[in-house]
Amino acid sequence: MWEARSAAQDHVQAEAQALHEISERVQVYPADARDRIRADVNAYVGHVVTTEWKEMADHRRMTEKGTELLDRIRTDVTSYEPKNDFEAQAYQPLVDQVAAVDQARNARADSVEPTMPGVVWFGLLGGGVVTIGMVFALQIRRTTRELILAGLFSALIAFLLFLIWDFDAPYSRGITASAEPFLALFPGIKG
């Protein structure tokens, strides 16, 4: 589960970094093309950190609007015809960065669902119940010390199950992958 949360954060970082690279590398283009691409990147980032992030947390899905905004970036970048060698040298890296955004977005979409199968949850919960049941079934003398120990052991199992549940959905529960990479690289966007 921790790996799934870490991987989800890596996807977010890769997507934000690729978008930042697009925004920076388009500097060599004429003002109208540059401004259009940057505006589309900013619209996409704004949508991701506000609307889409909430949709991922609440409903575990991406938005169609995010896909449309990414398609607009792709169209703007790929439809531009470089006018000189300097622009031509920037063209392919920009196309590559759009592909990197798309790949990271797809990876983010793949990681919105919980990662633990139901049968594993059944085993974890059943094992916890059996373990706690065994502590009380082994005819402990019910002294204060033994009851405290059994209570602490039960609390530990409950806490560990809570952590597993919390880490299981990397975008929607307490310790989540954050949109911070987007906000750090695009400070003008408010999440």
Image (cartoon, grey):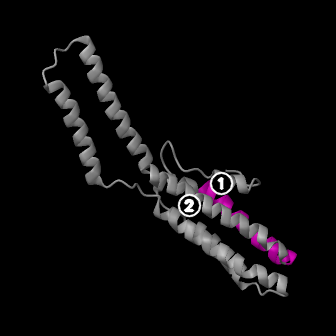
Q: Position of residue 31 (x, y in %)?
A: 87, 75
* Label 2 sits on residue: 11
Question: Disc 1 marks which amino acid?
Answer: Pro
Find numbered disc 1 in the image and state the secondary structure of the residue it sits on: helix
Span colored in magenta? 30-52
Residue 143: assigned label:
none
Q: Which residue corresponds to the image point at 23% horizontal and 40% vertical from the top-left?
A: 127
**Tag 1: Cα neighbours inside 10 Å, few (<14), some, or many (≥20)?**
some
Can I make out residue 64 in this image? Answer: no
- Residue 36 within the magenta-colored segment of the rendering: yes
Q: Is residue 69 above or below residue 53?
A: below
Can I make out residue 32 in this image? Answer: yes
Going by the picture, which residue comes out furthest to the top? 144
Q: Position of residue 9 (x, y in %)?
A: 55, 54
Find numbered disc 2 in the image and state the secondary structure of the residue it sits on: helix
- Residue 7 within the magenta-colored segment of the rendering: no
Q: Which residue corresponds to the image point at 38% horizontal and 39% vertical from the top-left?
A: 162
Between 11 and 182, the residue placed more toward the observer is: 11
Between 102 and 90, the residue placed more toward the observer is: 90
Between 163 and 145, the residue placed more toward the observer is: 145
Instruction: Please say if the residues under marks 2 and 1 sit with CB atoms less than 8 Å apart.
Output: no
Location of residue 66 (image quadrant): bottom right
Residue 181: assigned label:
1
Question: Disc 2 marks which amino acid?
Answer: His
Among numbered discs 2 and 1, the one appearing first in the sequence: 2
Q: Position of residue 99 (x, y in %)?
A: 61, 75
CA separation in Å, label 2 and label 1: 10 Å
Q: In the image, 56: left or right of 166?
A: right
Dominant secondary structure of the residues highlighted in magenta in the image? helix
Q: Position of residue 144 (x, y in %)?
A: 26, 11
Q: Is residue 168 above or below residue 80?
A: above
